[in-house]
Image (cartoon, grey):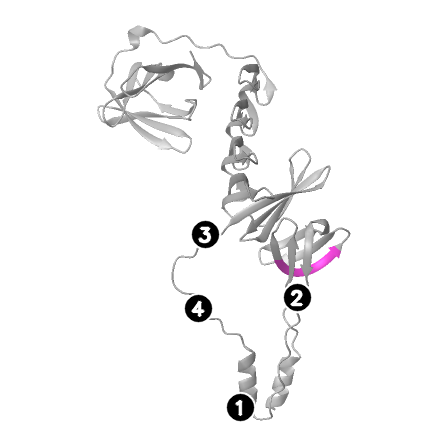
Amino acid sequence: MKILIFISFLLLPAPGRADTFIMKDGARLEGEVTGEMDGAVLVKTRYGALTLNKADIQERKAAEPAPALPVPASTGTAVAASTAAAVEISTPQPAGIEPAPRLTFSAVVLSTSSRQLIYSENGVAIATETYDAAGALLGLEGAVKDGTYTEYYPDGGLKTVKSMLAGKGSGTLKAFYPGGGVQVEAYYMSGLKEGPLKYFAEDGKLLMEAEYRGDRLNGWKKEYGPDGAPQSQAYYVEDELAEAPKPVAAAEPAKETDSMVTVKTLSLARGERYSFQLNGKYIGKAHLDKDFNIISHEGKVPDGAVKVYTKDGKLEKEFIFGKSQIQALRVYEPGGPLMAEYGYVENKAVKK
């Protein structure tokens, strides 16, 4: 009876075994092949189903068959010993902090009308994104983990750094020239460009800068020559050319008197947040980006000048309020001379 039970165990179907794929960009992927078609292989991985282009595969290693179990003796003791020998026992990992996973991505040109991004964790592909020639996402396979991903040139030099959150680009993106200089700097929120975008020449000179909201041009787009001199500029609203706004007049000097309003400053990833208080009570706040554009503003602040001081008591900035709105901003060397003064048009800082 025991021998019959053991024979039945041998006749059970073996679990699917994974093939190994070595991609031309160096990524390694393991999974069970579920189908093939012209130019593509369908692979089921622990991260989900992926479609691999055969042209991107450098080497494919088929799964090795599982070793046959030895035929046991007729006694129950021999059967138990043979079965125990075939079972792989894993030892627990030593206690300690595991190293953070290495997250990378690489771009593959599929045709003149599409390209693909391959995301990897520790060299193993975990997801692919396919885009058309215009940059629209056509499809996603697998799951892109949250974290900072890096892309490298063939010689190992850093090419791109970007952050992903909930499967979409969020935060700063930087692209680099082969020599190491910054080529592009942009900001994203939920996969959409949000904030300033800048292009640089290899020598570091600014070539173009533009302002985006919701992945659309909203604000000035300026282009510069190789010598850094301005060449052209245009104002946009929702990706359409528009008439440039007229700068507001400077606040009346008579209203620029010291007030009882105090300010608390908090540094953020995209600028600074200022909380305004009067007699110890909160009355409003403002969030400015690194170029002093107003991201958000709320509350009611009395008209006049509100001074911002460093921790050691030196004058750093001066807000000029009118009708509870920020009319102007003066920026000082801490405790020193005036560096710059800005007016505001539709929350955009305009240097005077």
> 108 left or right of 196?
right
Q: Which mark is residue 100?
A: 3
Q: Which mark is residue 92?
A: 4
Considering only vertical position in the picture, is 163 above or below 84? above
Residue named by callout 1:
77
Q: Do the residues labelled 3 and 2 touch (CB within 8 Å)?
A: no
Across and down, in percent, residue 122 comes to: 53, 53
Between residue 23 and residue 213, name the one nearer to us. 23
Across and down, in percent, residue 278 comes to: 25, 23
The disc, 3 or 4, on the residue closer to the chain's N-terminal end is 4
Task: Give the residue at x 46% y 10%.
Answer: 247
Task: Give the residue at x 58% y 58%.
Answer: 46
Considering only vertical position in the picture, is 93 above or below 111? below
Q: Does the magenta stretch include residue 218?
A: no
Q: Which SS type dominates the magenta stretch? A: strand
Q: At numbered mark 2, what does the secondary structure look like: helix, strand or loop?
A: loop
Q: How far apart are marks 3 and 2 (CA)?
A: 29 Å
Residue named by callout 2:
63
Amino acid type, callout 1: Thr
Q: At numbered mark 1, what does the secondary structure look like: helix, strand or loop?
A: helix
> 194 left or right of 290?
right
Amino acid type, callout 3: Ala
Q: At numbered mark 3, what does the secondary structure look like: helix, strand or loop?
A: loop
Q: How far apart are marks 3 and 4 (CA)?
A: 19 Å
